[in-house]
Image: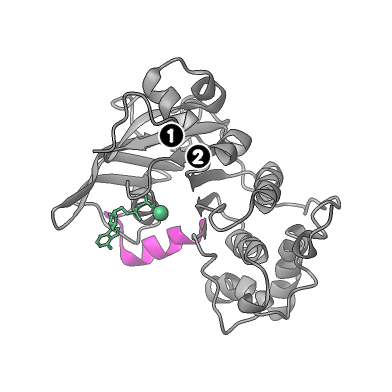
């Protein structure tokens, strides 16, 4: 079966030389309260840690003592009902929102205890795919993808073009470079957003509901692409979704958010096989169980 916007998805993807930074092995995140910073067996600090983070908007207490050490060089999926603060969590991790209390550590650095200039530097190590792709409507796919490179690097236009075309080829969009976002499908916009998120060769890539607004076939193709790109580029991936199928397909680790806290974090296989009624209800999407609506 072929889809107009997915026609190049089946061909083999070339692996560019020299991409991807070295990372520690993926591993189970230590329990809260264990030694801070260092990943076991390495001198590298964890790429992302959230420690006792609280955030309220007026009287809405969204993050209520959230703790999470993300497994390095692995894909972590964060699941939780809508409105639980998943996007708010992402904004804390990229330094767009400051916690009321608690720490957000990126590569061991508390992002709110460093200077604005240092935070700016740190952001270059992130690639973020926001929910709607967040492309600039006035720019074509090429310029959208080139944007982070033009903004954050001193590369020549020739070098920019090489990298951009490589990433756009990887996501099967090399023939759509001249198109504007509103001239392509939702699936293509997501893939363009993904290509853009990867141009700076980030150590951390975050996806906010990459599957929202996509039909099951395109969701499945995008999930394949996420797995493929992670295998090739490495890095710590965090993916927010409420689609259990997406979580099953892509996750190395699963984090469950409930009432402002991480109530479970662990290896995906174990989570999906868990007999814990709470975890089971969460991951099966059943209405009967210990989780209530309130
Ligand atoms: N900047 C903000 N100001 C006020 N309320 C906000 C802000 N950002 C998010 N919220 C509220 O926080 C809650 C969690 O939002 P969000 O993180 O977007 O949920 P989700 O888990 O669906 O991604 C929602 O009730 C939302 O209205
Ligand atoms: Mg959200």
Judged from the image, the quadrant occupied by ligand 1 is bottom left
Residue most extreme to the top: 275
Percent from the top left, x then y, of residue 61?
A: 19, 48
Residue 44 % position (x, y): 48, 37
Quick check: 4 left or right of 115? right
Find the distance from the CA under tag 2 to the CA under tag 1: 6 Å
* Magenta-tinted stretch: 112-126
Neighbourhood count class around disc 1 (C-alpha, 10 Å): few under 14, some 14–19, many 20 upward: many
| Front residue (pair 225, 123) | 225
Q: Answer yes or no: disc 1 within 8 Å of ligand 1.
A: no
Element on which disc 1 rests: strand
Instruction: Classify mark 2: residues with Cα within 10 Å, few (<14), some (14-19) or many (20+).
Output: many
Q: Mark 1 sits on what residue?
A: 255
Q: Is residue 56 left or right of residue 241?
A: left
What residue is at 39 percent from the left and 19 percent from the top? 277
Question: In the image, residue 188 lies at what x, y percent?
Answer: 67, 65
The foreground one among 22 and 27 is 27
**Residue at x 58%, y 30% (from the top left corner):** 25
Is 32 situated above or below 142?
A: above
Quadrant showing the C terminus: top left
Residue corresponding to mark 2: 77
Quick one: which residue is furthest to the bottom in this view?
A: 138
Assign a secondary structure to mark 2: strand
Does residue 69 show up magenta in the picture? no
């Amino acid at each position: 079966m072929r889809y107009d916007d997915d026609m190049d998805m089946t061909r083999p993807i070339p692996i560019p030389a020299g991409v991807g930074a070295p990372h520690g092995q993926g591993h189970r995140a230590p329990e809260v309260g264990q030694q801070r910073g260092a990943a076991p067996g390495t001198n590298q600090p964890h790429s992302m840690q959230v420690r006792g983070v609280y955030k309220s908007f007026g009287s809405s207490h969204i993050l209520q003592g959230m703790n999470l050490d993300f497994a390095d060089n692995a894909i972590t999926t964060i699941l939780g009902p809508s409105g639980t603060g998943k996007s708010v969590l992402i904004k804390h991790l990229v330094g767009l929102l400051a916690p009321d209390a608690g720490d957000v550590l990126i590569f061991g650095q508390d992002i709110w205890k460093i200077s604005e200039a240092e935070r700016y530097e740190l952001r270059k190590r992130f690639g973020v795919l926001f929910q709607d792709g967040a492309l600039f409507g006035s720019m074509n796919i090429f310029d959208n993808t080139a944007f982070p490179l033009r903004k954050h690097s001193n590369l020549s236009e020739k070098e920019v073009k090489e990298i951009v075309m490589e990433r756009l080829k990887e996501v099967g969009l090399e023939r759509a470079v001249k198109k504007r976002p509103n001239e392509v499908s939702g699936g293509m916009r997501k893939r363009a957003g993904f290509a853009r998120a990867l141009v700076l060769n980030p150590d951390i890539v975050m996806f906010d509901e990459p599957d929202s607004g996509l039909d099951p076939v395109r969701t499945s193709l995008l999930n394949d692409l996420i797995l493929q790109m992670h295998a090739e580029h490495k890095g710590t991936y965090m993916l927010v979704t409420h689609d259990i199928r997406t979580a099953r397909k892509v996750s190395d680790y699963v984090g469950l958010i409930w009432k402002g806290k991480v109530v479970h974090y662990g290896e995906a296989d174990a989570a999906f096989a868990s007999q814990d009624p709470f975890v089971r209800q969460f991951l099966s999407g059943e209405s009967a169980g210990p989780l209530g609506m309130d």
